[in-house]
Amino acid sequence: MKILIWVIALSVLTPWTAGALVAYMLVDVSGHWMSGNADMLVAEPEVVETLSWLARLMAGVGETVIIAVWAIGAASVSLVAWMCGRLVDRQRRKTQFAWHPDDPRAAAGRPVP
């Protein structure tokens, strides 16, 4: 059962990672394109340099945000899978070692392990 939980978690993480990779590449490519073509908006060198710097800054911030959101999502999915695995393991151990009600040890009032 734990293997099934982790297979489901990986099947959720795969498109999550692919989507984050596509978003990262789009932000990277568009940021480089905007910073390289800043001279298409204005002709003054100081303004072109400022626009190019702002485009590179925004691309860097966008890439950082994408990585942070991806990491939080991946950690959340992994944490939920780990907790479900622990819960399944705990339930399995509880049913595996539970005494049958007809067992003389249970009738004697001993605590069930």
Image (tube, rainbow, N blue to C red):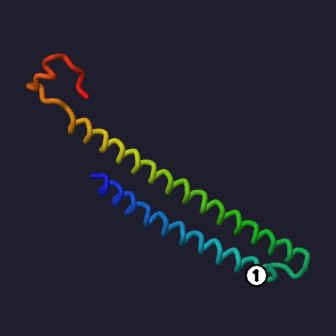
Side of 66 where 53 appears, left or right: right
Element class at badge 1: helix
Which quadrant of the view contains residue 4?
A: bottom left
Relative to 63, does residue 103 appear above or below in the rendering? above
Residue visible at 34% across and 60% down in the picture: 7
Residue visible at 39% across and 57% down in the picture: 9
Q: Which residue is mark 1?
A: 36
Label 1: how many Cα within 10 Å (few below 14, some 14–19, many 20+): some
Side of 55 where 113 appears, left or right: left
Q: Could you say which is closer to the camera, residue 16 or residue 107?
A: 107
Residue visible at 76% across and 67% down in the picture: 57
Which quadrant of the view contains residue 63?
A: bottom right
Relative to 7, does residue 46 appear above or below in the rendering? below
Relative to 104, does residue 51 appear above or below in the rendering? below
Q: Which kind of residue does numbered mark 1 sit on?
A: Gly
Q: Could you say which is closer to the camera, residue 12 or residue 7?
A: 7
Side of 48 where 55 appears, left or right: left
Q: What x and y, as percent, mark residue 84?
A: 36, 46
Q: What x and y, as percent, mark residue 43?
A: 87, 82
How many labels sit on residues? 1
Residue visible at 79% across and 68% down in the picture: 54
Q: What x and y, as percent, mark residue 86?
A: 36, 44
| Quadrant of the snapshot with the C terminus | top left
Q: Could you say which is closer to the camera, residue 37 or residue 111?
A: 111
Which quadrant of the view contains residue 51?
A: bottom right
Q: What x and y, as percent, mark residue 29?
A: 64, 78
Q: Residue furthest left?
A: 102
Relative to 91, does residue 53 appear above or below in the rendering? below
